Image: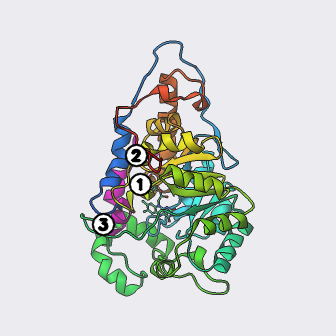
Amino acid sequence: MSNGWFETVAEAQRRAKKRLPKSVYGALVAGSERGVTVGDNTAAFAELGFAPHVAGLSDKRDLSTTVMGQPVSLPVVISPTGVQAVHPEGEVAVARAAAARGTAMSLSSFASKAIEEVAAVNPQTFFQMYWVGSRDVLVQRMERARAAGAVGLIMTLDWSFSNGRDWGSPVIPEKLDLKAMARFAPEGVTRPKWLWQFAKTRKLPDLTTPNLTPPGGTAPTFFGAYGEWMGTPLPTWEDVAWLRAQWDGPFMLKGVMRVDDARRAVDAGVTAISVSNHGGNNLDGTPAPIRALPSIADAVGSDIEVLLDGGIRRGSDVVKAVALGAKAVLIGRAYLWGLAANGQAGVENVLDILRGGIDSAVLGLGKTSIHDLTRDDVVVPPGFERALGVPR
Ligand SMILES: Cc1cc2nc3c(=O)[nH]c(=O)nc-3n(C[C@H](O)[C@H](O)[C@H](O)COP(=O)(O)O)c2cc1C
């Protein structure tokens, strides 16, 4: 193992904190308002227990499954995040790591690397879009992703422009020109390893969004793109069905927390949903997705693929989610910590930690495959679940 190897995701986070400038680290910690939701996303997993066996366990365990038609070697795929300034190779390093570990990559339309570069290193790449811009512009972006080789589309809906957090928001410059560099110099000086990574590439961290470049134009800045988003009329369920109809492959709606919305997603023709609250970065007070998962899986799990994201930090969290009805999970901060700590190898390290943890839990539960997990394998305390959007 290289020196950069770490044992847990918590250790990767500690290293990320040491390595990244304060504002970059703060952008990944994120959360909103009081931080109730971001806290519950991880705390809820700790409330769940296991009911293990001790003998008659299986020598071999199968962790593989499929997500939106893509075979994956473990029930974990990369969630879309804009990872500006974390690492010079950004999403390309993440996509390579996912490919090396046999899983799929999701690329955010707000990412720092172009879909062409990312799909070239991981043929199992999904492209994620928000409802930003006119219908013509949305179709153009989608067509570009298709031409680049994207094998699925993710529409993220759970963003309602929450801002402000009690522990303070990081200051992010519009672009990293010399003026901004001078302002942020003290942060860089205290993080020489991070600075050196970028210095070696002879490029400043890029704060533009190349997947939102208009034909023949230049990539907008992160804030320019955000402005276009705020000016776009909010999508209706008809818009969701329309977008879905424009994409003739697997389509995921990310950010569903209620049974009634999950049913509407089925009606709109989606292939999959992710039960998610945007990693606790949006409407604070939304419960952890793992609390809402069982009721949603019961309602629509036989019609579409039900995934979950939010709070996954260890393999046992993945097993709990699968036992409670998820086909697989997506991870966000876990791989961002790995990327910050050790680049591509750090993301591979995180995927290895999760694989080891999943395997160990499946072994202890006496199963031969993740497909054999059931709710009886998990100890769910009274009052744990939140069935949202169910008529009383
Ligand atoms: C820094 C950061 C940026 C994110 N950017 C996006 C994005 O561009 N698109 C999106 O669909 N979700 C985005 N998300 C949400 C993640 O895809 C995912 O839902 C969330 O991180 C899952 O929670 P976890 O971090 O606890 O795993 C972002 C999350 C973080 C932490």
Instruction: Specify the label residue 337 is tagged with.
Output: 1
Near mark 1 (Cα within 10 A), the count class, few <14, some 14-19 or many ≥20, is many
Instruction: Specify the label residue 9 is tagged with.
Output: 2
Q: Are marks 1 and 2 in contact (CB under 8 Å)?
A: yes
Is residue 158 rendered magenta in the image? Answer: no
- Indicate whether 61 appears above or below 171: above
**Magenta region:** 1-29
Of the pair 346 and 392, the residue shown nearer to us: 392
* Residue matched to label 3: 22
- Check mark 2 vs ligand 1: CB closer than 8 Å? yes or no: no
**Residue type (three-letter) at the residue carrying disc 3:** Lys
Q: Rounded to the nearest whole Å, what is the CA distance between mark 1 and mark 2? A: 7 Å
Q: Is residue 250 visible?
A: yes
- Indicate whether 42 appears above or below 143: above
- Indicate whether 320 appears above or below 285: above
Quarter holding residue 96: bottom right
